[in-house]
Image (tube, helix red, strand yellow):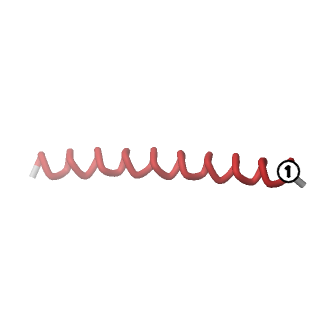
């Protein structure tokens, strides 16, 4: 049970990092679209 909880915690951290990276990429794409027009 301990390993399962630890694994879930690591998975949650990985997901949050992926979401942050995706949000940053969206912001960069939006800025590029604004500056291109």
The residue identified by callout 1 is: 36
Q: What residue is shown at x 12% (from left), y 46% (from top)? A: 3
Disc 1 crowd rating (10 Å Cα; few below 14, some 14-19, many 20+) is: few
- Left or right: residue 24 versus residue 19 is right
- Rendered location of residue 14, percent (x, y): 37, 46
- Rendered location of residue 23, percent (x, y): 60, 51
Q: Kindly give the residue lying farthest to the right in the view shown.
A: 37
Q: What residue is shown at x 46% (from left), y 49% (from top)? A: 18
- Left or right: residue 25 versus residue 15 is right
Q: What residue is shown at x 78% (from left), y 48% (from top)? A: 31
- Rendered location of residue 36, percent (x, y): 85, 51
Q: Quadrant of residue 13?
A: top left
Element type at mark 1: helix
Q: Viewer-proximal residue, 30 or 16?
A: 30
Q: Kindly give the residue lying farthest to the left in the view shown.
A: 1
Q: Kindly give the residue lying farthest to the front in the view shown.
A: 36
Query: Looking at the figure, which quarter contains the C terminus?
Result: bottom right
Q: What residue is shown at x 55% (from left), y 52% (from top)? A: 22
Number of dots carrying numbers: 1
């Amino acid at each position: 049970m301990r390993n399962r909880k630890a694994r879930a915690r690591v998975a949650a951290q990985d997901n949050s990092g992926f979401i942050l990276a995706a949000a940053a990429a969206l912001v960069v794409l939006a800025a590029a679209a604004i500056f291109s027009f």
